[in-house]
Structure formats: structure tokens, C-alpha cells
């Protein structure tokens, strides 16, 4: 992969700055940083600590990361996990398909001093139950940003999410202001979403 020909993305998170190298020329979409991952981090940064006695924070429970165990699927360059780690999500395993792992690992290593530790990684194809089971579900949170762009992937994605959260629970979702269609598709397919 050629990480030197594409723009480096910088994402300020609180008083830190994540720096992400991408390869926009590769044949894998995960080697590019997608907008939803940036928006998710800024959304969480904005809402996580917001408190008001007159205007309750509707996301307070979802964004309470205390003792939460999380997995990111289709993580690409790892922006969402890195950003949420800086915002208090300390137990997260970051996953993607094999050809994207070099870009993911490269960026986790690149930001190690900012993150303060090495985040856990694993290869995970949504269609491989053995890989899901190897992560020892259930997880409290499944993070996914910009992962639905072809209809055929919706079924495997939902099956994987259900297996990762376990116990018949539905993964919670946050608004997706960039690729607005994806949550609607998931909402239609997962009753109670
Ligand atoms: C558009 S990219 C988004 C990457 C990253 N989440 C972001 O927002 O920058 C979609 C990601 O989903 C992953 N993906 C797509 N289908 C997958 C599957 N069946 N199993 C695992 N990952 C998959 C791709 O490898 C890719 O990293």
C-alpha cells in the first residue's frame, strides 16, 4: 500500500490530535477515512459530558462508557475506536477484513503515543462465526461507521451484530448525519432499533 500519496487526516479530540494516514488508491474502501467516523467522534465528544437539569441529555446512557466492553467492525483506519478511546472507551477491540489490517495497524501504531496504549485488533469477516466467537461475545457496544453501502451486506452485518451483542439484544444506534440512509435500513430490519 502507498500511504504517502493521500492526504493525512487530522482529528482533534479534546486536547489531543489523531493523525491518520490513508491510501485512497487501494482497491479496499477501508484504507480511506470515511466521514461518518469523524462525525461519530465529534458527536460523542460533544454529547458525552453534556448535562443540564432543564434539558436532559438523551444520549447519556448510550455514551456512558463505564465498564463497557466494545468491538468495532469494519473499522478501516480505526478512527472511531481511536477517538472513542480518547473519550473514555477503554476496552475496545478493533476489527476489519484481512487486506485492511495493515492500514488499521499502521494507524493504531502511528497514534500510540496519543492513545497511551496499543488498542487490541482482530480480523473479523461478518460472515465468519468462528471469528466472531473467537472474540468472546457478548459485547456491550458494537461500533460501526459507514459500513453499509451495498444492500447484500446488510443481512450479514445484522447477523454479525446480533451475535456480537448476544442475548437477543439489539445494538443501539446513534444518528448518522452523513450517510443518512444506513440507520434507516438497519432500523427497518431490526425491530425495536
Ligand atoms: C466504507 S469503509 C468504512 C471504514 C471506517 N469504518 C470508516 O468509517 O472510515 C467500510 C468498511 O467495512 C468493511 N467491511 C465491508 N464488508 C465487510 C464484511 N463482510 N466483513 C467485515 N468487514 C467488512 C470494509 O473492509 C471497510 O473497512
Image: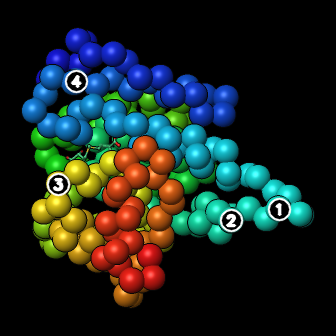
Near-viewer residue (76 or 139): 76
State the residue lying farthest toward the right.
53
Direction from residue 180 to residue 46 in the image, left or right: right
Q: Determine whether 118 is above or below 59 in the image.
A: above
Mark 2 burial class by Cα count in 10 Å: few <14, some 14-19, many 20+: few
Q: Determine whether 42 is above or below 54 in the image.
A: above
Residues under labels 1 and 3: Cα distance?
Answer: 38 Å
Direction from residue 136 to residue 19 in the image, left or right: right
Inspect this view and state whether residue 119 appears: no
Q: Which mark is residue 150?
A: 3
Near-viewer residue (6 or 113): 6
Q: Earlier in the sequence, mark 4 or mark 2?
A: 4
Quadrant of the rendered image containing residue 152: bottom left
Q: State yes or no: discs 1 and 4 in contact (Cβ < 8 Å).
A: no
Direction from residue 50 to residue 10 in the image, left or right: left
Q: Earlier in the sequence, mark 1 or mark 4?
A: 4
Q: Which mark is residue 55?
A: 1
Label 4: element kind: loop
Mark 3 burial class by Cα count in 10 Å: few <14, some 14-19, many 20+: few
Q: Position of residue 132 (x, y in %)?
A: 23, 69
Q: Which mark is residue 23?
A: 4
Q: Determine whether 149 is above or below 63 in the image.
A: above
Amino acid at each position: 500500500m502507498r500511504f504517502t500519496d493521500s492526504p493525512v487526516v487530522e482529528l482533534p479530540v479534546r486536547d489531543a490530535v489523531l493523525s491518520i494516514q490513508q491510501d485512497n488508491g487501494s482497491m479496499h474502501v477501508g484504507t480511506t477515512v470515511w466521514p461518518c467516523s469523524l462525525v461519530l467522534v465529534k458527536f460523542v465528544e460533544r454529547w458525552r459530558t453534556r448535562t443540564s437539569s432543564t434539558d436532559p441529555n438523551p444520549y447519556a446512557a448510550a455514551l456512558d462508557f463505564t465498564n463497557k466492553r466494545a468491538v468495532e467492525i469494519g473499522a478501516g483506519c480505526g478512527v472511531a475506536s481511536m477517538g472513542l478511546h480518547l473519550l473514555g472507551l477503554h476496552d475496545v477491540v478493533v476489527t476489519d477484513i484481512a487486506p485492511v489490517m495493515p492500514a488499521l495497524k499502521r494507524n493504531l501504531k502511528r497514534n500510540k503515543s496519543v492513545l497511551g496504549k496499543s488498542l487490541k485488533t482482530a480480523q473479523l469477516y461478518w460472515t465468519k462465526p468462528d471469528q466472531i466467537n473467537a472474540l468472546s461475545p457478548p459485547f456491550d457496544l458494537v461500533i460501526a461507521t459507514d459500513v453499509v453501502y451495498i444492500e447484500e451486506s446488510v443481512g450479514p452485518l445484522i447477523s454479525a451484530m446480533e451475535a456480537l451483542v448476544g442475548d437477543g439484544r439489539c445494538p443501539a444506534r446513534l444518528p448518522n448525519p452523513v450517510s443518512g440512509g444506513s440507520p434507516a435500513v438497519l432500523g427497518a430490519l431490526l425491530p425495536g432499533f
